[in-house]
Amino acid sequence: MLEITYLRSQAAEAISGLKKRGLDANQRIKDILKLDELRRENQNELDQTLAESNRISKEIGQLFKEGKREEADAAKAQTAALKNKIKDLQQEQEQLKHSLEQDLLALPNVPLDTVPAGNSEADNEIVQKVGEQMTLGHGAKPHWELAEDLKLIRFDLGVKITGAGFPVYQGKGARLQRALINFFLEENIKAGFEEYQPPLMVNETSGYGTGQLPDKEGQMYHMPEDNLYAIPTAEVPITNIFRDEILNSEDLPIKATAYSACFRREAGSYGKDVRGLNRLHQFDKVEIVALTKPEDSMAMLDAMVEHVAALLQKLELPYRILKLCGGDLGFTSSITYDFEVWSAAQERWLEVSSVSNFQTFQTNRMKIRYRGEDKKTHLLHSLNGSALALPRIVAALLENHQEEDGIRIPEALQGFTGFEKI
């Protein structure tokens, strides 16, 4: 959620920045600022009325002591009228606060100046390409055929048990999944991220905190009886660990990592892009999250991007890094770098990680703060990234490393799999 102080002082900058998303926010921000003005006027009147009521209340006792009963009774009547006014002003204040908060919640984050303008993924900026973009020879297969032939993944069993988008891993396929999870976690821990094991369901407050709610696209699985949501990423519970906390400056930055199953409805997904592991309703992912002082967040973003790149290099996968344009940015992000691996059999790029800096957008919702040297509290910046999402990594490993006698396992992963080839 954007800070109201930012919109008060830099409305023109916010309006200009949001145009990168293809959003004309001029009237919306004017309406928000008008609501904020009304709220502040109401609060000022409320404060004055409270002060007046308190002043008169103190006088009443003195008037009684002095035997001025009529004046005291008149003052009591006056305080009764003031109390009714206070009640009305308090109700109006709550209504104004609620309306202001709802309008702010509906406004996306403002892209940074370095984010390219654009309307869709076609306008994303390719920052770097690493590795050879392979083309496979005759007889090469896509990952869904390799997985079925080698009895690694059973898509039909997933349909039988649950439905499409819920595959069953078996044998070396299951071991490969477990190996990748352990590999990613160990690499993240080496890089200074502390491991957590979070819940797979969160409450409504947590969903609002990281910006998954309100869920306009219907991507979250909701359990109405308990009003809980299945997590779409470990970012949600991990970041909410620090909700409503004031952290010590010397404990920063906070760096956390977690493995979790992730659940996404992927409403409206269909066609060839959802075949095999390309798009699932349940999948495994290892996440990294960071909380930093504002002046340190861009350096942390660079470090997280470098870390994800190192993971892909160790897996010997061709990849590219994209800086997302304004029109392709997530709702909560101020800047995002996407990582895509090359699918040799499908001859296209598959997204495997997004590394984002949210600045104060999430921490303002969650009131995650730190106490500065000035003894005042300040909002932290939050960042997160996939390190990494497993399904498309598995797809790329199977396709890019397929040889005549099986699938070659990258050397960095062999200690975790216990085998060199499938």
Image (cartoon, rainbow, N blue to C red):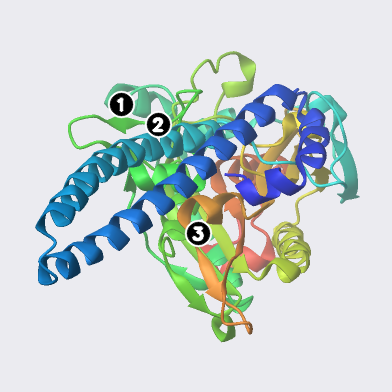
How far is mark 1 from mark 2, CA to CA?
Answer: 7 Å
Q: Residue at 51%, 23% (x, y): give it.
A: 217
Callout 1 secondary element? loop
Mark identifier at residue 166: 2
- Where residue 126 appears, as percent x and y from the top left, is 89, 41
Q: In this image, 108 relative to 309: left or right?
A: left
Callout 2 secondary element? loop
The foreground one among 105 and 161 is 105
Callout 3 secondary element? helix
| Callout 3 amino acid | Ile
Q: In this image, 226 relative to 212: left or right?
A: left
Q: Earlier in the sequence, mark 3 or mark 2?
A: 2
Pointers 1 and 2 in contact (C-beta within 8 Å): yes
**388 to 90, vertically: above or below:** below
Q: Earlier in the sequence, mark 1 or mark 3?
A: 1
- Where residue 398 appears, as percent x and y from the top left, is 64, 42
Mark identifier at residue 149: none
How far is mark 1 from mark 3, CA to CA?
Answer: 23 Å
- Where residue 99 appears, as percent x and y from the top left, is 46, 31
**4 to 344, vertically: above or below:** below
Instruction: Please name the residue that numbered disc 1 is placed on.
Output: 162
The foreground one among 272 and 262 is 262
Instruction: Please name the residue that numbered disc 3 is placed on.
Output: 181
**45 to 249, vertically: above or below:** above
